Image: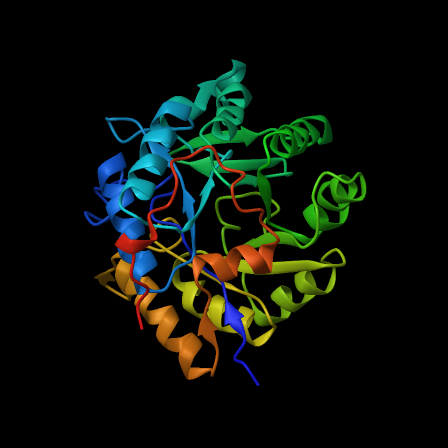
Amino acid sequence: MSKRKVIVTIAPTGGMARKSQNPHLPTQPEEIAEDVVRCCNAGASVAAIHARRPDDGATCNADIYRDINTRIRAAGCDIVINNSTGGGVHGDMVRELQGGRWEIAWEERIKGMEAGAEMCTLDATTLNLSFGGREILMDTPLSRARELAVGMKARGIKPEWEVFAHTHILQDVTTLIEEDHDATPHFINLVMNVHRNFQNAMPFSPRYLQQMVDVLPTNSIFCVSGIGPSQLEANVAALLLGGHARVGLEDNLYYRQGELATNVQLTERIVRLIRELDMEPATPEEARQIMGLQRGSSPLPAFAPAAMTQAA
């Protein structure tokens, strides 16, 4: 019997942390692309990419995304590229509202679809975030979530549904899937343990994870973003439930308590654990097959397979 193949997503940057928190955090296109290639060689098959401005502020600028994506392909790396439409909590992504509150700018978020990625994150969620003394609204009513879903389908982009609680799965995600905005299988990222900064998000525990898995739509596959110290435990729990893995400095800046991590270290560790559980990390092509991605749908430069070697 062949071993179960596990998709390993590397999330190298995110839209929140700064280099001052971890100097290994890649923020510029060359840094991000180089880290993604190294992680792919270590066993990652999907890259969940956020873009940053030259001053490290968060952005969904399509030109910066395209620069990152093209550099990855130019290095001969066939990893599945997933660009964020969530953005971040600083830089281009936030604007001040009346009354001293802030908002993640919708018109900036939708730019993330325009850089030729095979996948994009789709946050069908409305959340209030607390960062740096600011309350920041991520306002995604069903109409906006539908706009993202329709836009992705028109561009041949597979959505990665990003959810923070049971209600996000049972309400807008299920509604949009039932409206036929996403072909099966549906790839859903369960974000857990941001409840101190994201209102109505779920803390991580194996019990809460099981509850979220139990309400996934039919024909779904999933991974878990275990934020901070829950990353390792959440990934192991996800693997035991038949899910896939996600690691990276977007979700967790530390390898262990008091020791800052690199993206490659986090990738290598989860790959070792996958193999210890008698599974195998999926190659990028195997990940495409698992997720039902159509080859050739991306307008990015063609992949040069001779330049790429998958870690043994």
Left or right: where does residue 127 sit relative to residue 48? right
Left or right: where does residue 187 sit relative to residue 107? right
Left or right: where does residue 29 sit relative to residue 299? left
Instruction: Give the quarter of the image for residue 41.
Output: bottom left
| The residue positioned farthest toward the top in the image shown | 98
Camera sees residue 263: no
Task: Give the quarter of the figure containing the N terminus.
Answer: bottom right
Question: Looking at the picture, how far across and down is residue 228, in whole percent?
Answer: 40, 57
Question: Looking at the picture, how far across and down is residue 193, in whole percent?
Answer: 50, 56
Instruction: Give the quarter of the image for residue 39.
Output: bottom left
Residue at point 49%, 37% (across, down): 298
Above or below 234: residue 133: above
Camera sees residue 3: yes
Task: Give the quarter of the figure containing the C terminus.
Answer: bottom left
Question: Looking at the picture, how far across and down is residue 81, in whole percent?
Answer: 44, 44
Left or right: where does residue 141 sit relative to residue 237? right
